[in-house]
Amino acid sequence: MRSAIEAQASPHIAAGRLMLAGTIPNDQMASQYQNSDIFLLTSEFEGLPVSLLEAMGHGCVPIITRVESGVSEVVQSGTNGELVAVGDIDAFVEVIARLQQNPDQQREMARKAHRTLAAGGFSLPRMVDRYEELFEEMMHESSSGRYERPAPYLGELW
């Protein structure tokens, strides 16, 4: 798969517009985000990816698939990023091209992505506090006997 992508993207790789980095050690990710304008996530299924939050925190514009998950709580399409349909490669290309042709729009979306993290309670200290609150609530429910295990999801996954 990688070789097919490299073959099709070779003009863009040669021109320095695209880099297929592969696996990057965690301690090098901050510099990757700082040297990037866009964070592209083409998943068919996600929760709330830490990589998305990290990228937005570094001012990358997220262009991600619209999936049933926590991403829609963070990314508002057209404001601080873009949500596209799963599998709609043409939509990804259109958004990337539009942002490349409109650097002012790209910068404004990047600022809004960064502000979303700062104002939305997604900082590391706030997330730790929220997890601590959740664990305390779970422990209280468990020890008081109020906890009821949720029913399993029996619907279709895809």
Image (cartoon, rainbow, N blue to C red):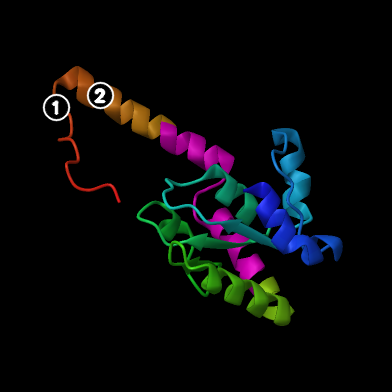
At horizontal 46% and vertical 47% (from top left) the residue drawn is 48
Which of the two residues, 152 or 108, is positioned nearer the viewer here?
A: 152
In this rendering, the answer to whether 147 lies above or below 67 is above
- Real-space CA distance between mark 1 and mark 2, rounded to the nearest whole angstrom: 8 Å
At horizontal 52% and vertical 73% (from top left) the residue drawn is 91
Q: Where is residue 156 in the image (x, y as percent from the top left)?
A: 22, 48
Check disc 2 and report the residue beneath it: 140
> Which stretch appears magenta?
108-131
The answer to whether residue 144 is seen in the rendering is yes
In this rendering, the answer to whether 28 lies above or below 149 is below
Which of the two residues, 62 or 8, is positioned nearer the viewer here?
A: 8
Q: Assess whether mark 2 and mark 1 are in contact (beta carbons under 8 angstroms).
A: yes
Check disc 1 and report the residue beneath it: 146
Residue 133's image quarter? top left
At horizontal 49% and vertical 40% (from top left) the residue drawn is 127
Report the predominant secondary structure element of the magenta stretch: helix
* Residue reaching furthest to the right: 15
Q: Where is residue 134 in the image (x, y as percent from the top left)?
A: 35, 33
SS type, badge 2: helix
At label 2, counting other C-alpha atoms closer than 10 Å, the crowd grade (few under 14, some 14-19, many 20 or more) is few
The total of numbered circles placed on residues is 2
Q: Position of residue 124 (x, y in %)?
A: 57, 40
At label 1, counting other C-alpha atoms closer than 10 Å, the crowd grade (few under 14, some 14-19, many 20 or more) is few
On the picture, is 118 further left or further right than 141? right
At horizontal 15% and vertical 35% (from top left) the residue drawn is 151
Reading the chain from its start, which is encountered first: label 1 or label 2?
A: 2
The answer to whether residue 58 is seen in the rendering is no
